[in-house]
Amino acid sequence: MKKVKFFAILMTVCFISTIALPMNAVLAKEASQNSSSVDNDFIFDFSDLDYSIEKISEGHLRMFYLTEDDEKLQYDFITYKNNEMAILLNGLEMYRIPIKQTTSNLAVDTKIATLSETYYFWDDMYYVTGPYIVYPHLYRDQYGISPYSDFSWPGTQVYHCQIQQSTSTTLNAGGCESICFALGVLLGNAIGGTAGAIIGGIVGIIFGTYAASSGTFVDEYGCIWWMVGKTFVQWLHTYESTIYGLYMTFGPVVAQSFVAGAFASGGYLRVGTLTLWDAIGAGNP
């Protein structure tokens, strides 16, 4: 009996290894390619997603999302006092994990104080900073961006995104963890389908482990600006069926480990003034 059990475990490890090894090769290859080749298959855009967010209580964020098939999904992100995080999808717990805070690999708080507005290019996008600008972000007039709508646009290495004012107010009250949870769900559901719903929860948990306690998140219009690496977004789209298969076959821990490894080796995440992770060398705006 022990031999049978050992053999089953060995086969499981071998199966996961056959997926993890090519994953690293794909990430390395994509990181060396330019943005046009990375984005041919999928462009991340959450501006048309039908969603809403509310704070239920301290450490409890609820997010509603309406799919293309008019199916209403409810995500609950709960942080427990025993240093555990959980995600519930439609009232059922997807999984619960211990909080293992990941140390950001860059200094936080990159607010810049200048006497007058300064305009410059970063990641091939037109940015502004100045005395009335809380932190550097896209120049709204250049791109026709309203503070009352969501926005995302691809640069060379990252997607430059704004969350509208009212939603930003709710998220900001929940702190960096709540923001990171929600960003993961938006990213997954932009991919779409049942797999996207599962991936959103997984990425939300992973982003949450990179959350920091300090930093400024809303800008002078009360909006949250955030960025995510294009290579990682494309990787999620390419491997969405694999991630979903791992989740359904082996459970959330295996699926999360698979995605977490990809993000750690080829991801980028910035929220407000904080660059929470930079494995691609994009730097700060």
Image (cartoon, grey):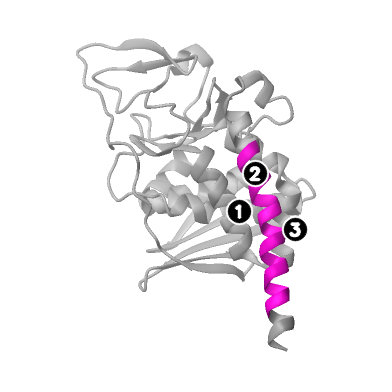
Give the amino acid type for the residue marked by disc 3 in the picture. Answer: Gly
Which residue in the rendered view is the most extreme toward the front?
3
Residue 53: image location, x then y, percent: 52, 51
Of pointers 2 and 1, the one earlier in the residue sequence: 2
Residue 190 visible in this rendered orientation of the protein:
no
Q: CA distance from mark 3 to mark 2?
A: 15 Å
Span of residues in magenta: 6-25
Query: Of residues 106 and 158, which is closer to you in this image?
Result: 106
Residue beneath disc 3 = 245
Neighbor class of circle 1 (other Cα within 10 Å; few <14, some 14-19, many 20+) is some
Neighbor class of circle 2 (other Cα within 10 Å; few <14, some 14-19, many 20+) is some
Q: CA distance from mark 3 to mark 1?
A: 11 Å
Left or right: where 189 falls relative to 149: right
Query: Quick check: is 153 in the magenta stretch?
Result: no
Numbered circle sitting on residue 258: 1
Which residue in the rendered view is the most extreme toward the right?
69
Residue beneath disc 2 = 23
Residue 152: image location, x then y, percent: 56, 28
Please tell me whether mark 3 or mark 1 is closer to you in this view.
Answer: 1
The C terminus appears in which quarter of the rendering?
Answer: top left
Left or right: where 230 falls relative to 82: right
Q: Is residue 71 above or below residue 280?
A: below
Which of the 4 image quarters holds residue 47? top right
SS of the residue under disc 1: helix
SS of the residue under disc 3: helix
Q: Are marks 2 and 1 in contact (CB under 8 Å)?
A: yes
Q: Are marks 3 and 2 in contact (CB under 8 Å)?
A: no
SS of the residue under disc 2: helix
Residue 285 visible in this rendered orientation of the protein:
yes
Give the amino acid type for the residue marked by disc 2 in the picture. Answer: Met
Give the amino acid type for the residue marked by disc 1 in the picture. Answer: Phe
* Magenta stretch: dominant secondary structure: helix
